Image (cartoon, rainbow, N blue to C red):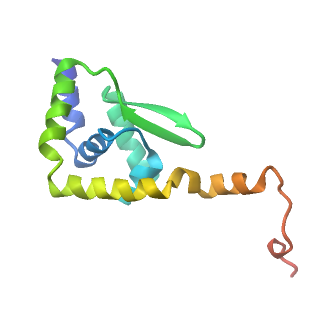
Amino acid sequence: MEQLAQMYKALSEEMRLRIIMLLTHGELCVCDLMAIFDESQSKVSRHLAYLKHSGLVKSKRVGTWMHYSLREPLNGATDAQLTFMKQQFTELPIFLEDEQKLEDIKKQKLCDNSPREQFWNNSNGNMKLKEEDIDND
């Protein structure tokens, strides 16, 4: 019973509910969720940590980013609840908007385009300064 109560507590906050619905589409990076919600990394990560602690999601590091997905296998009651939510909630406007943003964000490949990733991908370990980077004052 405690596990069931923990699941409902985790789903009682709007952003966490939206995150779970997005994760039904597969693994997502923190940067994807930041872009979809237009929220800071710390806020998104705080909600993901709550979901992870509740046993609904799992995480793994991919490069400089954390990626999250639904934990599998889930217990019967949790799995049934998530199946019900996906069937019943996907047509609600907020979830349709999130799904459209997800499609747009996935095309952008945000994890590959972070400034840090761009620097390392473009430098190939060569850290020489260009002339325009030097202040000659």
Quadrant containing the C terminus in the rendered view = bottom right
Q: Residue at x 24, y 43 (%)?
A: 17
Residue 45, given in percent of the width and then of the height, sits at: 42, 44
Q: Seen in the image, is 11 located left or right of residue 119?
A: left
| Residue 73 appears anywhere in the view | yes
Q: Quadrant of residue 9?
A: top left
Q: Residue at x 62, y 58 (%)?
A: 115
Q: Residue at x 86, y 73 (%)?
A: 131
Q: Quadrant of residue 34?
A: bottom left
Residue 103, given in percent of the width and then of the height, sits at: 36, 55
| Residue 2 appears anywhere in the view | no
Above or below residue 49? Residue 124 is below
The answer to which of 135 and 102 lies nearer the viewer is 102
Q: Seen in the image, is 72 located left or right of residue 5?
A: right
Q: Residue at x 64, y 54 (%)?
A: 116
Quadrant containing the N terminus in the rendered view = top left
Above or below residue 39? Residue 137 is below
The answer to which of 42 and 123 lies nearer the viewer is 123
Count of number-bearing discs: 0
Residue 93, given in percent of the width and then of the height, sits at: 17, 58
Q: Seen in the image, is 71 located left or right of residue 2?
A: right
Residue 82, given in percent of the width and then of the height, sits at: 20, 33
